Image (cartoon, rainbow, N blue to C red):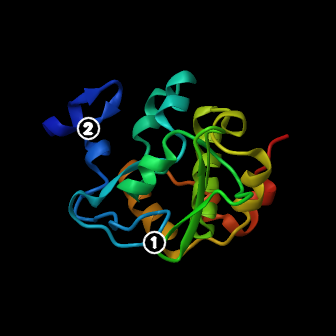
Amino acid sequence: MRARPALRLAVGGVCLLRVRALSMLGGRRFERICVYTGRSLEGPAWSREHVVPVSVLKGCGARNARGDLHNLFIADRAVNAARRDYTLVEPWGNLRLRLGDDEWMVDARARVFAPPQRARGAVARACLYVRDTYGVDVESRAIDASALWRWADLPVSDYERRHHVVAQEQQGRCNPYVVGADDQASRGRKA
């Protein structure tokens, strides 16, 4: 059987089908809901969010990680633009911003971003997946190490489970930190 052209096209090692996959996957759509705010997004209001930023992935030689759907989420363009490639941290001080009911923090001088409570478990589990799958040192380049483990212990949301199902169907592999979140976060730690 001949492969469809979209499956053969690649840019920088990233399958274009995977990059486009946030809109449609084999009849199943990712929900256009912002991972950070939980709001439904339409039209140009959304963008792709690499939880472990592309700048970190490039520097680590993790070529295939750029298109990995377990690291890609839909995000509000404004929040994604504010997040940039800043390190994920716990919020502190009074540098907090509000978008509706969600409180998050960005400090451009310190190059840090504190996601709202609703997103912390999902971003931590995505970071752990990238670390284990691609060998990326996320603790020094993408997320504060102490926050990583506290957040990974948070319950998996229904949104995160639905995102995981679509990503797993497309890629054929799961994020064990989502599937076994009840016990995986404590058993999967590496020293």
The image shows residue 9 at horizontal and vertical percentages of: 21, 30
**Quadrant where the N terminus lies?**
top left
Residue found 65% across the figure and 40% down from its top:
132
- Viewer-proximal residue among 24 and 4: 24
Q: Residue furthest front?
A: 94
**How many marks overall?**
2
Disc 1 marks which amino acid?
A: Gly
Q: Residue at x 59, y 65 (%)?
A: 116
**Mark 2: which secondary structure?**
helix
User: Which residue is rendered at x = 70% and y = 68% of the image?
Assistant: 154
Callout 1 touching callout 2 (CB < 8 Å):
no
Specify whether residue 172 is in view: no
Residue at the disc numbered 1:
38
* x and y, in percent, of residue 28 in the image: 28, 65
Q: Indicate the quadrant containing the C terminus: top left, top right, bottom left or bottom right.
A: top right
Instruction: Indicate the amino acid at tag 2.
Output: Leu
Q: Position of residue 185 (x, y in %)?
A: 74, 58
Q: Give neighbour class at mark 1: few <14, some 14-19, many 20+ (Cα, 10 Å).
A: some
Label whose residue precedes the other's in the sequence (1 or 2): 2
- Give 152 or 115, whichever is nearer the viewer: 115
Q: Nearer the viewer, mark 1 or mark 2?
A: 1
- The disc at residue 144 is none
Identify whether 103 is placed above or below 46: below
Q: Which residue is mark 2?
A: 16
Instruction: Estimate the spatial distance between the alpha carbons at disc 1 and disc 2, rounded to whole Å.
Output: 26 Å
Numbered disc 1: secondary structure = loop
> In the rendered view, would you say 120 is above or below 8?
below
